[in-house]
Amino acid sequence: MKSLFELYREHTGKVSDKWSIYLSEYDRIFSPYREQPVRLLEIGIQNGGSLEVWSKYFPHAEAFIGCDINPDCANLVYENTRIKVVVGDANTDSSEFEILSRSPFFDLIIDDGSHFSGDIVKSFARYFRHLSDGGVFVAEDLHCSYWKNFEGGLYYPYSSIAFFKRLADIVNHEHWGVEKGRRQLLLGFSEQFLTEFDESDLAAIHSIEFLNSVCVVHKRKALSNVLGKRFIAGQNETVVSGHNGLTGSASIPQSQSGNPWAAMKCAPEEAWEELTHLLSQRDSQIVGLNQTAAERDGQIANLSQSASERNQQLINLSQRCDQALRTIEEYRDSSSWRITAPLRFISSKLTSIIRLTKLLPSIVRFGGGPVVSVKKAYRVLSSEGWVGIKQRILYVAGNRSGTFSSTNRPALLSGEVDRNDYLEWIRRYDTITDESRAIMRT
């Protein structure tokens, strides 16, 4: 039988576009199915030439279904009645229904559609369940998954190549050592592309094979995908002993619940965007705090300057006070001050006499007349001395403008003190006013 490369080289019908590595590797991958009545689904057929080549490569195939979103594909006509074309988006329920109406299952599925990561992931989730046990799912042109305009990037966590890499972990699910289902490992892709995966379908993944720009997924029953029992052959154990007793034992995974790299909720690359967003928020908060701190620093600087100015003012006032005190001391120590001391004394006494002369009418009036006032003053002088006389003069000076009745006038000049009169006690013994203190000094 001719190889796939030879069939492509001889093909003269509708155009088909494939990379050379695909042709050689497909010969290896699909050769076990060449003589079988397979059913093939190809998503993305463009000009439709690949369906013609497949019909020659699989002579006993039952159906070749091609699906393409381009409405011009409705104009494609084939002489081979096994070839059918569905026009529409393969990732819609209506297109899926139409595809399955032509064939309820498939043995070979080739995704050569839009090459967008989201479309590839959703096509796998939608059609892998319709792949028969022992079938093969092929995703082509995965080099696009490294390009941004195809929803990709070398480290983009939701690229199609990242998705198929994650399926390799699902093949080894029994060794994870943590209580986590297969679907949980793909939760980020489910949320990113709004699609769902079935646990039983994921358990049917037998192997993942990567070629340049191609991923090949083989499907088998779940029991065929486990590690199985241990098989020991031979009898001599001259280097490491104890193997003969392990025949038929099963693999027991080590618990990884305490391993942070196994117990984390999602893969680190999936958390990158969220962490980057949080870091951006923190950076904004730090900028705001720095701005607030700068404002506070400005306020502190202003307060420090004000405090410095106040301190300088206090220093200046202190210096002025010191200067004033020195000036006063100089005056006191000067000859002129000492020479004029008697004059100042006489002037002070004359001032006191003048003030007393002005107060005499009030003293005489309060005392009940000249004669009576003199007698009362004599009694006060005899009993209290000049202090008593001075207290009464101060009282008269403080109340010079007032009028006193016989009921409220204190017996100041009589020398007789009413010990039950609280106001009189205050006048005699409590703190005197500033004005009275000034008069006493003179």
Image (tube, rainbow, N blue to C red):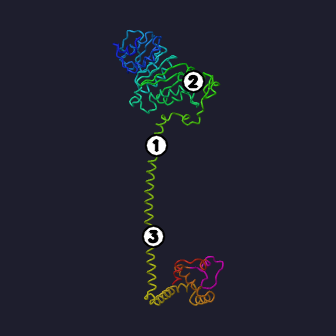
Q: CA distance from mark 1 to mark 3?
A: 49 Å
Residue 439 in the image, given as x and y percentages of width and height: 52, 82
Residue 246 in the image, given as x and y percentages of width and height: 63, 25
Residue 414: image tag: none
Q: What quarter of the picture does the N terminus occupy?
A: top left
Residue 227: image tag: 2
Q: Is residue 98 visible?
A: no
Label 2 sits on a secondary structure element that is loop
Residue 209 in the image, given as x and y percentages of width and height: 47, 23
Magenta stretch: dominant secondary structure = loop
Residue beneath label 3, please? 314
Identify which amino acid the numbered label 1 is placed on.
Gln
Q: Is residue 28 left or right of residue 381?
A: left
Label 1 vs 3, first from the N-terminus? 1
Looking at the image, residue 428 lies above or below residue 254 = below
Identify which amino acid the numbered label 3 is placed on.
Leu
Q: CA distance from mark 1 to mark 2?
A: 46 Å
Identify which amino acid the numbered label 2 is placed on.
Leu
How dense is the environment of label 2, judged by Cα within 10 Å: few (below 14), some, or many (20 and up)?
A: few
Q: Is residue 34 visible?
A: yes
Residue beneath label 1, please? 281
How dense is the environment of label 3, judged by Cα within 10 Å: few (below 14), some, or many (20 and up)?
A: few
Q: Is residue 366 left or right of residue 165?
A: right
Label 3 vs 2, first from the N-terminus? 2
Q: Tell me if label 1 and label 3 are in contact, CB under 8 Å.
A: no
Q: Is residue 77 left or right of residue 369?
A: left
Residue 412 in the image, given as x and y percentages of width and height: 60, 83
In this orientation, which residue lies closer to the viewer: 197 or 131? 131
The magenta segment? 404-425
